[in-house]
Amino acid sequence: MASDLKPWAIALIVLAGIVVGGYLMLQLLRVWAKGVYNRLQKESKTACDIDAFVDVQRNPVHALKVVLVYKFQLGNRTASTDPIPLECSPSPHVDGLQVSRRSGTTNTESDKDKVVVPLEQILAETEKPPIVIATIRMGFGHHRLAYSAASWALQAGHVAIFHDLLNIESPESDLVKSTDELYSRFSRYASEIGGVAEKAWGAAMKSGDADALRIAALTAAHLQPLLLTYPKDTPIITTHQLVALTASAAGFTNVVNLVVDNHAQWFLTVPNTKNIVQGPVNYQNFLRMGIDAKELAWAGHWCPYDMVQNIEADCQRRIARAQAGKPVRLLIPVGGAGAQRKFIVSLVEALAPLVRGGNGGNNNAVQLFLNAGDHAHMKQAFLETLDACNLDFDTVTTTQGVRDFQAKLLSEKDNKKAANMKPITLFSFDEYFPAVATTDILCRVSDVLCCKPSELAFYAVPKLHIRRVGDHEADSALRAAELGDGTVEARTVDDAMDFVTLFRNGPELLTTMNESIIRNNSVGIYDGCKKAVELVLEKIQSK
């Protein structure tokens, strides 16, 4: 009888069989995934109940998605709850800051002269409870926020412990490193390729739904050993949500989570912590999503102590420079993932006619401070561009050199040394700390920070926002533009040059931006890290 069927009928029957079989297979996979998800929840040894936090009625579990991503990342690993012993040594870069690592790993040549102390000794000997600043180096942003928070903790007279999960040698930190490497690689690909790749990456950066939070929480359950040496009531400020999830999983009771960006996503928030945000729109959106008001606060922008304390003087100096027609000093840093090479190089080429023509002073329209960070490929790209454009420049390669450069410009009063500086200074380094710190240090002596709308979009300095890397950053540029201390996002080099022209043609825009910063500061807009420290200390004092 089958031979009597027309070919099209046979094809239709086969197609129907495939569809029905595929549907049944999908249903079986969903049943399997639900069972695996429930088992993982029981076996994860975590105090972090994500399903209660996000409300499964409003945000149901898509178990197949969660389980497949989890299995891809972790396979059949079993979570451990064995603490990793820790020791601390003074930071070579920040006075008073202690840096944690796994005990027994300080055996390199550079460690010979360091004072290494077991964590237990620091906890026992400090008069005031130490504040742990817990983070992950994923790009520069999370470390930048950690150093900002540490600056306020130190100012409050507390020992601050810089606890980077990647610095604790272990299988757990290796798990985080693999995620970091993927993030950095795809950020670079999206920025360099553009088009469909950029759109896909942008969409991915805005897809942090409740399931993404569930996946992150299951991952964090495996990272608990990286924190378990600390007492559970230790005051902890986290600058990466995965660290906050780890602390929540381990049952820590005094955790403040600095929520990054200005785009509300479940992925960025954590139960059993105080999630603090930088602006009112984020605060409102998180409340609408269903986060308990007791676990949420609007604190202000994450800015370092030195920057905030000098806002008035630095803004007045910028206004005076603008009104005197001085060259516009543009600070152009490269992000930690090393993305944006094509855009930044094209921008420097477009700026070349404005910086060419001899030394500084009034002989050129702009001066450039180029921070290549610790990216060898960006340093090489800058060098090739400067050579091709026949641009004269100086180089700085040490943290002390950066501080000396800042000091020279802070003390300048039309002195010859500052007036005769070359129109471009290239900053490049072999290690990450000066790569991060240089931007913070130079913000104070720059007229405009030229950056993608990342964590820097919230800094107390006039900002020219260039093309974003990830669509989640778009809302950060809007926040700055509404506050008056930054531009809207310049998606093309021509758009960016339009703003440079505005900065050059008169003092009005730069004056307005600096006056906005002064006004914002008067109501605590830039006090976010200060308030984070106050929140963890309040919980100690209330005991």
Image (cartoon, rainbow, N blue to C red):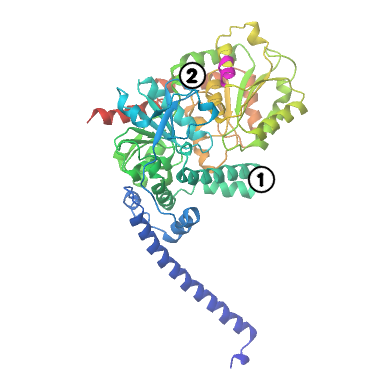
Residue nearest the observer in this picture, 255 or 463: 255
* Callout 2 secondary element: helix
Q: Quadrant of the rendered structure where residue 364 is?
A: top right
Which residue is at 59% across, 45% downward?
Answer: 186
Q: Which mark is residue 193?
A: 1
Q: Name the residue rendered at 47%, 40% in the picture.
A: 169
| Spatial CA span between label 2 and label 1 | 39 Å
Q: Where is 238 relative to 72, above or below? A: above
Quadrant of the rendering where the C terminus is positioned: top left
Does the magenta-highlighted stretch encompass residue 403?
yes
Determine whether, in the image, residue 483 is placed left or right of residue 418: left
> Is 347 left, or right, of 114 in this rendering?
right
Taking the view exactly as shown, the residue that stands out farthest to the left is 543
Instruction: Assign the N terminus to one quadrant of the image.
Output: bottom right
- Give the camera-side residue of 476 and 3: 3
Part of the protein shown in magenta: 399-404
Percent x, y for residue 55?
33, 52
Residue 164 pos. (x, y %): 45, 35
Say few, some or many: other residues with alpha carbon within 10 Å of mark 2 (under 14 / 14 to 19 / 20 or more): some
Measured along the vertical axis of the image, is residue 323 above or below residue 298? above
Residue 515 disc label: 2
Please name whichever residue, 481 or 542, is drawn nearer the observer in this view of the structure.
542
In the image, is 251 to the left or to the right of 455? left
Q: Is residue 425 magenta?
A: no
Q: Position of residue 58 (x, y in %)?
A: 35, 54
Q: Which mark is residue 316?
A: none
Q: Position of residue 185 (x, y in %)?
A: 59, 44
Q: At label 2, which amino acid type do we have?
A: Glu
What secondary structure predominates along the stretch shown in magenta? helix
